[in-house]
Image: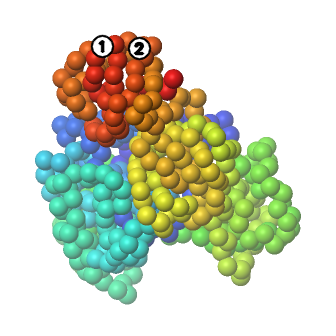
Amino acid sequence: LEWGAVESYRFEEDGEWWLKEYQFVEHAIVHHSETPNSQDPLEAIRSIYYYHAVTRGWHDIGYNYLVDKYGNIYEGRAGGRNVVGGHAYEYAHGSSGICFIGEFFDDEVTEEALASMVAILAWTCRDLDPLGQRDFHSETQVPTICAHRDVNLSTCPGDKAYAELPTLRALVAQTLANFPAGVAADLIVGDQVRTVVGTPARDDAGLAAPQTLELPEYAVGIVMAGPVFADGLPWYLISTDYGRGWVEYSALFRDPPIGGTSGIFGLEDIVELTESANLRNRPGVQSEVAEHAPAGTVGLIVAGPEDADGYRWYRVMTRERFAWVASTYLTWSTQPAPDRPIPTTDLFVGDSVRVFDGPLQVHRTPGLGDDVIGILQTGDVGTLIAGPEAADNQLWFEIRATLVTGWISAAYIERTNATIPANFGPGDTFTVTDGPVNLREAPDADAGILAQLETGEPGAILAGPVDAGGYSWYQVETSQGVGWVAGVYLTLQ
């Protein structure tokens, strides 16, 4: 269903900010949006879009699909099936993020929302075992249908929604098992479809069922149930902006078609250059050249086609980069698909950095496979002390932060001018950098206030740190007395 996306959030002068990237989906990750359950769903989804696209600077919504309390299903991240979203750190690669709109710590999910979640999960997991498990990035034996909390340090999708996952898995498995093999009708629950001219929708499957509405040409709908065979024909229950009804199969066509493109090449086709050619950052001959690649360069189609400047363009993944190339230089290849390219970075050892997309896992060594020794949240800062090192198709730096030192992916940090909090020890002297600061009876934001320390107030560290409430607390001695202060407000003298 349409929800009123402001498309300008997604585009700059040369095209989309967040270029589409595709990866085979191995898991479906269930989320909740933590928006008020009383809020109008369309207002909620627009607020989520603004938060992701503008506030967080992603230029699109991070979830692949969203489901509201009435059972409506919405497309989130633009690009269709297998497009990489932004919903679970590195676990967004190889998964589809599907979000219940609302907050489900204490409130139950509606029956309508659960039914539609089954529908979209069945479509997403149509090539998977919905009851299965497999290793996924650094986690072992992750269920095919899992929750955000199963792969990240999170309470999402809330306890009530999380408790529904075993039922969802069973219903998805039942839905897929009931799909009859060998029939002409090849649609499945969760498919997006369009209608042909003058398509009648009925109360039930069959020509004798009362007609409830007539759908216009090219009306977009989601398959909610079917096929059901009546009068020798397969029928599907379709949900559209105009209403719901049963439609005969021949009046429907899948949108987008299987393969995801309408050009010569399809998504995940392996291609190679027939002659040397410019690989560009955007479709079009005016776009900047990322590389002049030689004939025989092998790539994997990950997006397209896009028509620009008289050419048809495809985005390809080569061993070196993601880039766009005109189709006139491409042919199918018998070579294996290239490995995912290692990204580049403009960060260096000694840089002060901040996390712009947390929570971010901190590893003992570079790579996703080693032990996670800590978590950095959005806005946390630190200093790069080693790197970069290439591992798991990412670049890694060792960071020294307030609470942890370890290796993080460079893809989720940016250079900052912020002051990096020091690690204090007993006997160190300090000054208050951002007063007035509360001097408290104990290392807790709810502890009693003994005094207020103004900017520039000197003091000495007596003990600490003690981690509580998201802060590192230090016992200090000042002219105002002895008490506890959050270290984020102090700097070494």
Quadrant assignment, res 187: bottom left
Is the residue under label 1 in contact with that under label 2 (CB below 8 Å)? yes
Instruction: Residue at 40%, 20% (x, y): give it.
Output: 459
Of residues 461 and 30, which is closer to you in this image? Answer: 461
Is 313 drawn above or below residue 51 in the view shown? below
Label annotation for residue 480 = 1
Residue 432 falls left or right of residue 18 = left
Q: Is residue 434 visible?
A: no
Amino acid type shown at disc 1: Gln
Residue 367 falls left or right of residue 441 = right
In the image, residue 6 lies at what x, y percent?
Answer: 47, 35
Q: Which residue is mark 2?
A: 457
Instruction: Residue at 22%, 37% (x, y): give it.
Output: 36
In the image, residue 115 lies at what x, y percent?
Answer: 21, 61
In the image, residue 278 lies at what x, y percent?
Answer: 82, 56
Is 371 drawn above or below residue 55 in the view shown? below
Characterize the local packing of mark 2: few (<14), some (14-19) or many (20 or more) Cα atoms within 10 angstroms.
some
Instruction: Residue at 28%, 52% (x, y): give it.
Output: 156
- In the structure shown, which secondary structural element does the residue marked by tag 2 occupy? loop
Quadrant assignment, res 232: bottom left
